[in-house]
């Protein structure tokens, strides 16, 4: 492999004036919560809503005139697809994208808007990849790999140079890991200029290739379960990205679906930032206590993308509220007589809880005659607030369970 750090520096020149250097912002709220200095690298504000344009443009720009004339093809669940479609359109190159049938609607609509021809195939990236490679060979198209390509890795690595420019005293950078293109490029850039910086990768718990590969010492396939971090749900780490990851990473950790949802919610509430699941995993790692940092350490979280489907976002917010203890569901049985329900809900109101939903059932199978079963969903401050409400209701004689 060519010297990746040198390729990153060349990519910075190639992308100048084309790709937007994204903001690096300090978060006082997150810094206070995690007792270190937290900065957010906002790649969710990048063109197309993701870092992927960096590598895609750098790769397509390097093609020969003949290759550009024949066109390019790729496989992606969304962000890389948008990056390739956008870059190809800017460079006057025809593009085809093979997407899994499970790709979020918002992403394939966006890909088409950038002028790409979209083909749906398979239930995941690997099947889409096989179809794209087949079409590339048959039609003489250049395949633009989502991560396992030196020039793609180098393009993503320009993020590392921007971080060092804005925060030379950075101590730790936390990066999402799927196939490894993003983290390998960033790590090569950081280590090329500042050897002592720590680079930590974060996977979704349902996608374990990076951690398994590091244990085995070679790229191996891991499990790829359903995850809201679909952008990093890759079965196998790249053959070219893995040696860089093995050389430079300080650690690679996994986070749960609940923590990812909680991180998305936290970024919306505290920073007014919409971030997709893959982009939220660095914050989720802090929330789970899997990133160790001292009080004076400068920690950068790379928020890699913001392309989350609105319907998914709605579900994620609900899950995040539950994870944070902000929603409580209670069940009780009340006498079916006038005034009973109003007295019950008044006790809830006195403790400053908002009622989101009520189901009042007289015909429930497990409900005695003359009684009504009540399922009620409350908006609460946290788990402690819910416990205080339950304790108050029981003190008033209501048989309540959560």
Image: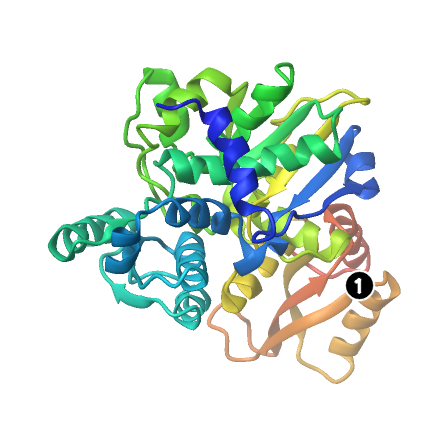
Q: In this view, does 351 lie above or below 259?
A: below
Quadrant (top left/top right/bottom left/bottom right) for the N terminus: top left
Q: Nearer the viewer, residue 222 or 327?
A: 222
Q: Which of 373 and 267 is in front in this view?
A: 267
In the rendered image, which quarter is residue 168 located in?
top right
Question: Horizontal placement of 170 versus 77: left or right?
Answer: right
Residue that appears at 52% across and 44% down: 14
Residue that appears at 60% across and 25% down: 190
Q: Name the residue under label 1.
A: 353
Q: Is residue 139 above or below residue 324?
A: below
Residue 344 on image: x %, y %: 77, 70
Question: Horizontal placement of 386 versus 333: left or right?
Answer: right
Q: Nearer the viewer, residue 220 or 339?
A: 220
The answer to whether residue 21 of the structure is visible from this angle is yes
Label 1 crowd bin: few (<14), some (14–19), many (20+), radius 10 Å: some
In the rendered image, which quarter is residue 393 located in?
bottom right
In the rendered image, which quarter is residue 69 located in?
bottom left
Q: Which of 384 and 13 is in front in this view?
A: 13
The way the protein has been coloured in the rendering is rainbow
Residue 64 on image: x %, y %: 30, 47
For label 1, the SS is: loop
């Amino acid at each position: 492999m060519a010297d990746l750090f040198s390729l990153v520096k060349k990519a910075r020149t190639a992308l100048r004036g084309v790709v937007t250097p994204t903001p690096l912002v300090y978060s006082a709220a997150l810094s206070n919560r995690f007792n270190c200095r937290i900065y957010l690298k906002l790649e969710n504000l990048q063109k197309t809503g993701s870092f992927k344009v960096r590598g895609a443009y750098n790769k397509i720009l390097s093609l020969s005139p003949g290759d550009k004339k024949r066109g390019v093809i790729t496989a992606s669940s969304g962000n890389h697809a948008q990056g390739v479609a956008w870059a190809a359109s800017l460079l006057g190159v025809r593009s085809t994208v093979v997407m899994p049938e499970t790709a979020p609607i918002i992403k394939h609509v966006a890909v088409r808007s950038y002028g790409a021809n979209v083909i749906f195939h398979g239930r995941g990236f690997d099947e889409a990849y096989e179809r794209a490679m087949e079409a590339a060979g048959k039609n003489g198209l250049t395949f633009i790999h989502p991560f396992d390509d030196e020039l793609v890795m180098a393009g993503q690595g320009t993020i590392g140079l921007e971080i060092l420019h804005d925060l030379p005293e950075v101590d730790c950078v936390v990066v999402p890991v799927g196939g490894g293109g993003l983290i390998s490029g960033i790590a090569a850039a950081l280590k090329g200029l500042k050897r002592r910086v720590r680079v930590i990768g974060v996977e979704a718990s349902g996608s374990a290739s990076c951690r398994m590969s590091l244990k085995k010492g070679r790229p191996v396939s891991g499990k790829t379960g359903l995850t809201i971090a679909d952008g990093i749900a890759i079965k196998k780490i790249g053959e070219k990205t893995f040696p860089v990851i093995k050389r430079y990473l300080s650690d690679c950790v996994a986070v749960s679906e609940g923590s990812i949802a909680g991180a998305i919610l936290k970024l919306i509430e505290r920073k007014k930032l919409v971030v997709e699941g893959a982009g939220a995993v660095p914050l989720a790692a802090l929330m789970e206590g899997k990133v160790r940092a001292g009080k004076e350490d400068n920690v950068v979280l790379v928020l890699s993308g913001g392309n989350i489907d609105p319907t998914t976002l709605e579900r994620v917010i609900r899950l995040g509220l539950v994870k944070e203890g902000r929603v409580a569901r209670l069940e009780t049985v009340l006498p079916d007589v006038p005034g009973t329900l109003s007295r019950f809900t008044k006790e809830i109101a006195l403790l400053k809880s908002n009622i989101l939903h009520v189901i009042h059932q007289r015909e429930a199978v497990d409900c005695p005659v003359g009684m009504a079963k009540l399922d009620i969903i409350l908006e609460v401050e946290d788990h402690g607030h819910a416990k205080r409400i339950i304790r108050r209701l029981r003190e008033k004689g209501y048989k309540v369970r959560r």
